[in-house]
Image (spheres, rainbow, N blue to C red):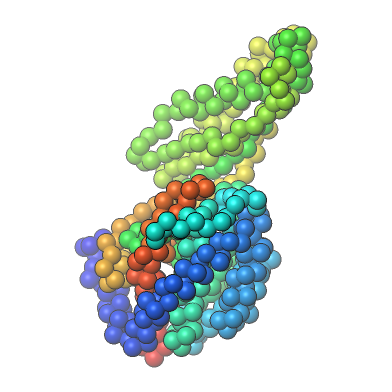
Amino acid sequence: MSTILPSVADQGIGSLLESTTVQRAFSYFDSRAEAITKEQTQINSIPSPPFGERKRADYLRQTFSALALTNAHLDDEGNCVALRRGASDRPLLVASAHLDTVFPADTDLTLRRVGAKLFAPGIADDACGLAGLVAIAGALQSCEIETAGSILFVATVGEEGEGNLRGVRHLFTKSEWAGRIDAFISFDGAGLDGITNGALGSRRYRVEFRGPGGHSWSDFGTANPVHALACAVARLASYPAPTDPRTTFNVGRIEGGQGVNAVPRQAAMDVDLRSTSADELLKLDAFFRRSVREAADDENFRRSSGTEPLAVVTEMIGERPGGETSAEDPLVQLAWAATEAVGGKPSLNRASTDSNLPISLGVPAITLGGGGTSANSHTPDEWYDPRGRAVALKRALLVILGTVGLEGK
């Protein structure tokens, strides 16, 4: 990447850094560090489980309305959408963060502070991104920064798990903005240096084995769904997943059975398959499906004569397309130059984020961290440290303004 720079991106960043309005926005981030953290904790206190993001979306809608963004509303899928008009409708940049967490609605979200660290489920992923989105909108409005193109602020539903990118999928394929978006930036989690330009492809399945059930003694020999499921897991675990291209699999949840002395009638599992290579993902997917079929066939072969066979249902519950925004794309170069400009050490990486969808459609897209540091994501012990957040927000502003342009430049 360093051989590409210096580039047009460098020249654009230099011009932005010389702007007095941009410097005022930088001061806005510095002076409002505590207020931004308070906003983050407020956002995180609102439960936002998968398919239950409405209350948090309403809060973001009210916040965007208070900032006088245009037509802040919830779209048909539940995304919170607000427009900041520039001198022209194009280019149109989406700046986004996701509303949902991996945690159920009854999760204790009580904030705990240990030194500078904030402990709470979801505090980094993605209350950090949402707070950054609000801060960026606030800086643009407060400093009266006029842009050539327009910015669509979007807080998306369905980024996590079984949400299957339903929010960003709707935005790009069914919403009033479909076909009109020129670039996309997602703010997800903490960090400064990373630039996610690669979309990690994945497929997710729910597999259910069903049988007649019975008593563990008198009905021994009846096809057992748990036994079949265990065999399927063992077969998957034997898969020789390559490290290059990196390929992974995970059985994340299993359930079934009624008691220790009952042959279960049902057993189910949720499975996650990923690879940086589309071809390897297809190979893993085929192996997994074959493993499930063979596990059911083997259990049925072993069952007692005259008993009912197992049935198996394999349902795809998520598919995230892979792909990449080229390292030579102006958006990636811009993010690289902006990261260096604020003192970061840029690096390109690959992950599964909202950016997967626009990348698969050929729309330039990247995901950036919202600053600070964090750990233990997706666990009750998740924490976030906001120190250094302002630097990442400055980077974000430079990338946004470098994309849509300052009016008069």
Kindly tell me whether residue 354 is visible in this rendering.
no
Question: In which image quadrant can residue 324 be found?
Answer: bottom left
Measured as percent of width and height from the top left, residue 299 is found at 64, 17
- Residue at 67% across, 63% down: 54
Measured as percent of width and height from the top left, residue 68 is found at 58, 84
- Residue at 58% across, 77% down: 64
Question: In which image quadrant can residue 175 be found?
Answer: bottom right
Pick the residue in front: 375 or 196: 375
Pick the residue in front: 366 or 263: 263
Measured as percent of width and height from the top left, residue 220 is found at 71, 10
342 over 28 or under it: above or below: above
Pick the residue in front: 20 or 258: 258
Q: Tell me the quadrant of the picture where the C terminus can be found.
A: bottom left
- Residue at 59% across, 65% down: 171
Q: Tell me the quadrant of the picture where the N terminus can be found.
A: bottom left
Q: How many marks?
A: 0
Kindly tell me whether residue 241 is visible in this rendering.
yes
Pick the residue in front: 134 or 341: 134
- Residue at 30% across, 81% down: 17
Instruction: State the residue lying farthest toward the bottom.
Output: 408
176 over 283 or under it: above or below: below
Q: Is residue 9 left or right of residue 133?
A: left
